Amino acid sequence: MAMDGKRKTLLQTVGLVVTMGALAWASVPFYDWFCRVTGFGGVTQEAGADSDEILDRTIKVRFDASKARGFDWEFKPMQREMELRIGETGLAFYEAYNPTDRPIAGQASYNVTPYDAGGFFSKIECFCFTEQVLQPGERVEMPVTFFVDPEIVDDRDAKHVHTITLGYTFYEIDLPESEAEDSQAALDTQSEQSNLN
């Protein structure tokens, strides 16, 4: 049984729309996976332990901090740069401060420049792995433990890198449910006390 031209065109159009929708849905997780595997776009690697090898060659690591527009925290690196041997574990700190009168939750995104070095910059522990909640007036020091993988010296493009910049951008996220409930309870208590006075 042959299809007429209109029906065939309709089925082809529906098939194209379904295919494009499936590709769009899969593109975000695929791109995330691709960046993590290759270090593309300055995405760093996660490591479970220190490097097994430490080279005599050194590399300079610079630290950068920024915030999303309208985000009320103060956020900065506690050191501007450090020099360490390739493969040696480094420990750096960032400082965050909530100057407001309300708890604020934040999450940090990160990248490494130059991008060629992203696949060789390995973080062991990082505040960026989890959300952060700062109470009103709270100031915290947040660590990041990292190393530069010795394989960088064998990479065609990255072997010429002498300075790496690790940058974080903090942006506000919704308070975790337990924090939001505690905050609301504290506001209710303050309101009741004001009404009694």
Image (cartoon, helix red, strand yellow):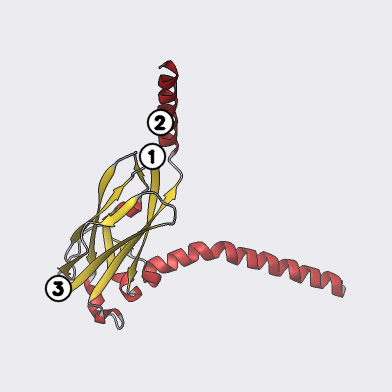
Q: Quadrant of the C terminus?
A: top left
Residue count near mark 1 (Cα–Cα under 10 Å), binned few <14, some 14–19, many ≥20: some
Left/right of residue 20 with respect to residue 191 in the rendered view: right
Q: Quadrant of the N terminus?
A: bottom right
Q: Are marks 1 and 3 in contact (CB under 8 Å)?
A: no
What's under tag 3, amino acid-wise? Answer: Leu
Secondary structure, mark 1, is loop
Residue drawn at x 18%, y 71% is 86
Secondary structure, mark 3, is loop
Question: Residue 103, labelled with which disc?
Answer: 1
Left/right of residue 188 with respect to residue 93 in the rendered view: right
Looking at the image, the residue that sits furthest to the bottom is 156
Residue count near mark 2 (Cα–Cα under 10 Å), binned few <14, some 14–19, many ≥20: few
Residue drawn at x 85%, y 72% is 6
Q: Which residue is mark 3?
A: 55
Name the mark nearer the viewer: 1 or 2: 1
Residue drawn at x 21%, y 72% is 150
Percent x, y of residue 145: 23, 57
Alpha-carbon span between mark 1 and mark 2: 10 Å
Labels 1 and 2: the sequence-earlier one:
1
Residue count near mark 3 (Cα–Cα under 10 Å), binned few <14, some 14–19, many ≥20: few
Secondary structure, mark 2, is helix
- Look at the picture and state if 159 lies above or below 167: below
Percent x, y of residue 9: 80, 72
Q: Which residue is mark 2?
A: 182
